[in-house]
Image (cartoon, grey):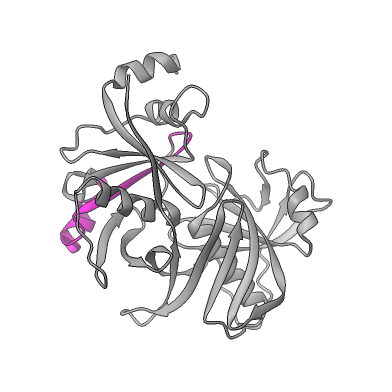
Amino acid sequence: MPHLEETLARLAPLAFAKGHGTGNDFVLIADPEAQQDLSADEVSALCDRHRGIGGDGLIRAVPTRHVQDAQALHAEHPEAEWFMDYRNADGSIAEMCGNGVRAFVHFLLDQGLVELAPGESLPIGTRAGVKHVAVSANGYAVDLGPWRFTFPVSAEEKALDSLVETPGIDAARPALSVDLGNPHTVVALQQLAELSAAQLTTIPRVDPAPPHGTNVEFVVPAEPLVSDGIGHITMRVHERGVGETQSCGTGACAAVIATRHWAGYPEAEAWDVRVPGGVVRVKFVPGADGAEHVELSGPATIVARGTVG
C-alpha cells in the first residue's frame, strides 16, 4: 500500500463534506461527471481517523448511468438519477447503509444537486436496489424494501442459526441472521451490563462464518418491551470492514426484526432503537410489491466541508 500521505496528496484538490447519522460518520464526495472512481487505498486513506479526514465509510454521489455495475438498475429504474457508491472504511465495497443513505440525500440537497419537497420521496440507486427517501419529522425516512431471514424460518421457530463469540461476553451466544440487502447477525443479551462489557474492537467470531462477512448486532430489549405502542431496544454493533460504529441503520432494522420475531410479534406502531450515537426509529410498512417493508428514520447532519490538499 502506498504511503498514506502520498495517497492523499495524489487526490488533491478533492472537495469533500463530512456528515453523520446518529454518529455513523461518512466522507461525502460529489462526482457528477464520474471522475473520482476511488481505489480501496484512497478510500482507506480518506477514512483514516488520525491522518485522513476520518469516517466509518466513504460515499460518492455519482449519476447512476455512469456506474458500470449499475447499468441494469439504471435501465429498469431510470428515475433513480443518483447512485450511492458506498465503501467501508477499509476500502471494501458495501451493498447498503441505512444511516448512509439518509446522509447521502442530505448531502445531495446541501450541494444543490436535487430538490425534495415535503410529501415527496427521492429514489436512490444502491447496490441493494433502489431506496426511496423522504423528509420525516426526525430527519429523513428511507424505505429499505423487503427484508428476509437469511435462512428459512417459520413463525414457531426460535430462529437461532449461528453462535457468536465476543471478548467480554462469557460464552458463545446464539444468534439470528437477517438479510436487508447486506448481511446481519443479531445476538440477544439480557442485561445492559453485558452489552457494555462486549469488546467490539475485536471482530466477533460467527460460526458458521458467513462467506462475505457480516455485521453483528448485540441487543438488549427493554422491560416492558413495548410501551405506549412503541417498542424499545438498545444496541451496539460491529460493522463489517469498519469495527464498532456509533450507529448502523440497517443493523437497527435487523435488530428489531429479530427481537420482534423472538418476542412473538407483539403489536407496536414503531420501534425506537437506542445506539451510542442517538436514537433511530424503525417501522414496518406494506410495500407496493405486497411484501412487508422496513422503514428507517432518523437525523442526518453535515458537520464540515473542505478540500483535500
Q: Position of residue 128 (x, y in %)?
A: 36, 57
50 is within the stretch colored magenta: no
76 is within the stretch colored magenta: yes
- Residue occupying image coordinates x 47% and y 77%: 284
Q: Quadrant of residue 306?
A: top left
Q: Is residue 280 left or right of residue 305?
A: right
Q: From what the image shows, is residue 279 above or below residue 46?
A: below
Q: Position of residue 6 (x, y in %)?
A: 38, 13
Q: Is residue 148 left or right of residue 113?
A: right
Q: Is residue 220 left or right of residue 267?
A: right
Number of numbered discs visible in the structure rendering: 0
Q: From what the image shows, is residue 146 above or below residue 208?
A: below
- Residue occupying image coordinates x 22% and y 38%: 31
Q: Is residue 142 left or right of residue 49?
A: left
Q: As drawn, which residue projects farthest toward the bottom? A: 267
**In the depicted view, which residue is nearer to us: 109 or 74?**
109
The C terminus, quarter of image: top left
Q: Position of residue 252 (x, y in %)?
A: 55, 61
Q: Position of residue 193 (x, y in %)?
A: 80, 55
**In the depicted view, which residue is nearer to us: 37 or 139?**
139
- Residue occupying image coordinates x 52% and y 40%: 241
Span colored in magenta: 69-91
**In the depicted view, which residue is nearer to us: 222 or 184?**
222
Q: From what the image shows, is residue 114 above or below residue 146?
A: above
The N terminus, quarter of image: top left
